[in-house]
Amino acid sequence: MLALHEAQAAIAAAIRFGPGRIPAALFTGSAERVLLGLKIHANTISHGRLIALEDSFPLTRSAMGHPRFNRLSRRFVEGGGAAAASLAMIGAPFPEWLAAARTARWLVQLAQFEWAWLCAYRAADAPALGLADLARLDETALLALPITLHPAAQLVHSDPRLIRCLGLQHGDWLLVTRPAAEVLLVGGGAELAALFAAVRRPITVGTLLERLQRAHPEAALLALFTLAIGAGALT
Amino acid sequence: MERIPALPLARALPPLAGIGLKPCHYGAVLGECGDAPLPAWAEVHPQNYFADGGPVHRWLEAVAAVLPLSFHSTGLSLGSAAGPCLEELAALARLVDRYQPAQVSDHLSWSVSGADHFPDLLPMPYNETALHRLCTSIAMVQDRLRRPILIENPSRYLAFAGDTMDEAAFLHQLCRQSGCGLLFDINNVAVSAGNLGLDAAAMVDAIDPALVCEVHLAGHAREDHGSFVLAIDDHGSPVAAETWALFARFVARAGALPTLIEWDTDVPDYAVLMREAAMAGAILAAAEGLAAAEGDHARAA
């Protein structure tokens, strides 16, 4: 009888690479019967991963069609792309894998958007900064106010056509937020990306405006700041 | 190994029928679908609520306000040679602290080997080494959660050549050495017995009811392979007649226990699930009536 760690390593290898890795004397019963038992486990594992990918990327699946999505996700799973991940996190590397597999750029971006949506949906709850909070402050207090990204806020680079498909107005960046129960989407340009990068770490409103004013006009910045607060992207 | 002293449970599940709760049934349980009956309690997979925040917690908070909850974990990998998955344990501990469920359980299985995480309940041999590994892992989990947990007997498709004890003996040793309770899955008994050529009734009769804190019932699929039929524990159909009979046999001896209807794939309408729960409830009530009658008879004697 193998030691426990050896038996588990052999079963893991059989699931990943095929039943040839199983020592003959590990299980009782005929080779055919042992193979069937292992297949049940291998199928459960593969099915669980494929369903988790389908659940994580419903729009990407719908956009590329189920047969193609299934073919690609099988390649991802069988290539070991999901081996180290829990089912909840299985989708994290999938968009980049799709890009490496030369999937159309807009489909990769759709998958990136869906993963960002899921991250926003699952993120920690926190009160979002609201315009009413700012209205109570005088100018000095406003400029000294420390702000940072809301834990649910995500930013993804997206083809403008994809942003239009999502019913948004403009830009090639997509801000995904969830200040309360609902996930919200805002499209924007380079200034949105600059704002997002600047508030990744806590920063005062005054320092933020000073930093962004070097590259963006003040009027556009105020509109952007209002937009980000309206979307619940800051806390 | 020294036995861990039993800790008092936060809140016991009632000895009645509960259901495995799925998101599609939140509305029914929360009274948003008319006068749908409520189960006596509900069980969820905590891994579905490991999110830091968001709507899933709003749902679970609402459900926890109306029903006793049981957390049935699938990810601790208690049997892994390297020990339980600490990341899963940390997440489970946070969730248990937050919701204080009536019961917490996981499986007699492993799912992590090296860097590989397998979304399945992989089999353990029944020998002293496996027993020691599981007892050590269960002790770690119970210490972290500050409560005893329940361990579910597995569905088996394979038997190890090096087994030195049968399932009942292994489970009894596990419970007595680690201080955990037994989540007795009677569908798993039907599946394992069918697949390994064992006597399901004898397996049920061999279990010490004093160790059982919860019972699971579910359906399984059957695949015909010519010379034999393979039972697959897919939780995708009504409880099989054989499983109902084994359940009635067990509770006639054990008395009423919290009993769950599990249905995880091809999840049916709430009414179908509640019909299964009502059947379980009727068998539990009959067992309770039998126990009361026996008690009366003993007192009269």
Image (spheres, rainbow, N blue to C red):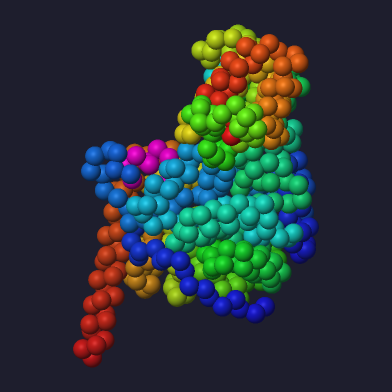
**Majority secondary structure in the magenta region:** helix
Res. A49 visible in picture: no
Residue located farthest toward the bottom when viewing the structure as drawn: B301
In the rendered image, the vertical position of residue B58 relative to residue B299, given as above or below: above
Image coordinates for residue B36, horizontal then vertical, percent: 26, 44
**Residue depicted at 44% across the width and 62% down the height:** B102
Which quarter of the figure is the C terminus of chain B placed in?
Answer: bottom left
Residue located farthest toward the left when viewing the structure as drawn: B300
Res. B273 visible in picture: yes
In the rendered image, the vertical position of residue B67 relative to residue B248, given as above or below: above
Of the pair A76 and B222, the residue shown nearer to us = A76
Q: Is residue B256 left or right of residue A68?
A: left
Image coordinates for residue A204, horizontal then vertical, percent: 67, 31
Image coordinates for residue B197, horizontal then vertical, percent: 54, 60
| Residue stretch rendered in magenta on the structure | B20-29
Image coordinates for residue B165, horizontal then vertical, percent: 62, 72
**How many marks overall?**
0
**Residue depicted at 51% across the width and 69% down the height:** B181
Q: Is residue A184 left or right of residue A119?
A: left
In the rendered image, the vertical position of residue B48 relative to residue B246, given as above or below: above
Of the pair A41 and B79, the residue shown nearer to us = B79
**Residue depicted at 51% across the width and 60% down the height:** B104
Of the pair B180 and B147, the residue shown nearer to us = B147
Magenta stretch holds residue B152? no
Which quarter of the figure is the N terminus of chain B placed in?
Answer: bottom right
